[in-house]
Amino acid sequence: MSSEIPLLSIVIPAYNASATLSRALGSIEPLDSVEVVVIDDGSTDATASIAASFTDRLTLRIISLERNSGASAAWNEGIRASRGTFVTRLDADDILGPVSPVIPLLTDSADILWGRVESLKNGKRRRLKRPESADLNDQPICVDSFSLWGKAIRRSLLSEPDMECFPGIDCWDDLGVVARLLARHPRVVFTDSLTYTYILQPHGQSLSTSSRQRLLNDHIATARLLEQRFIADGIADRYAEFLNHLKFAAKVKLLRHRDRDVAAWKSTFPEVNRRIMGLRHVALRHRLMFAAVASLPTKPVQLIANLFDSQESLT
């Protein structure tokens, strides 16, 4: 291993990723200034051997965890193992964008380089929305704002003890990190370069009931933990708008599809129910519908909630 400190570390948390890891690693340009750190999160398949097959092409290290600990723990381990000045994340089932165009932008004047993210589904690409500001209150609760995808972040910031992913959170694990980073007013440089491609599941694949429940639980837990952290840091009032949007987004799936639970939706973060019309990042038609849900008895709510099911995104 070279003693020279790389400019960029690419951290790949991987658990039983033998079906997609070759594609992910194959998307990475072999550059001297870039290292790849694969965190094998207790895999029982060929994940480690597939990663090892790329050591001739990439500056690559494999960190093997004894047991599966989840995406958040794997990311935390990746930060500890990284050596680069900047760190970015690549999920084992996604594709990294070209690295060479963004390397010149990783300078002393940037804490976060924020690139363009696209999704790919059934061969069709879609550019994900990106905010024009790094102000936390200006961020809609969406994939591009709060994922670690497409962002190269100064490792010294991520290495601070309170910047680890919340333990046990595997969905929105990166939201908890990015929100805390933005609350510290880092120097953010935006680039229009494609830095990440998010591979969506093909039509016909859907989450199981247990997976949807874990996702919902993680969303609600993340909102609670972030609010607690912001209160402890004395910044909850400053970022009240962000927290209201976050809590609304965290519980929105309680009103969607076959898992609908109107009573649970009303009782989860009930303080948000009276603030729905002020959520400027939520489309007006959705604010009107949710405001009605918050004020009406359960039976009429069921009829209104049916209107949500055809919507892909409510935020």
Image (cartoon, rainbow, N blue to C red):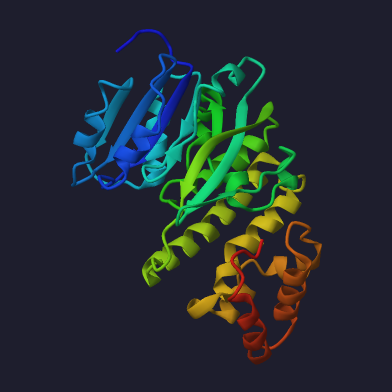
From this view, report whether residue 29 is shown above or below residue 226: above
Front position in the image: 207 or 99: 99
In the image, what residue occupies the spot 37% across and 38% down? 24
In the image, what residue occupies the spot 62% across and 42% down? 179
From this view, report whether residue 183 is shown above or below residue 286: above
> Looking at this rendering, what residue extends furthest in the top direction?
3
- Location of the N terminus (image quadrant): top left
> Looking at this rendering, what residue extends furthest in the bottom direction?
299
> Looking at this rendering, what residue extends furthest in the front direction?
123
> Looking at this rendering, what residue extends furthest in the right direction?
278
In the image, what residue occupies the spot 40% across and 8% down? 4
Estimate the x, y position of residue 93 in percent, counting from the top left.
37, 46
Position of 238 compared to 32: left or right? Answer: right
Estimate the x, y position of residue 79 in percent, counting from the top left.
43, 29
From this view, report whether residue 222 is shown above or below residue 98: below
Estimate the x, y position of residue 110 in percent, counting from the top left.
64, 22
Q: Quadrant of residue 205?
A: bottom left
Q: How many marks?
A: 0
Q: Quadrant of residue 287?
A: bottom right
Estimate the x, y position of residue 207 in percent, counting from the top left.
40, 66
- Location of the C terminus (image quadrant): bottom right
Front position in the image: 58 or 284: 58
In the image, what residue occupies the spot 35% across and 33% down? 26
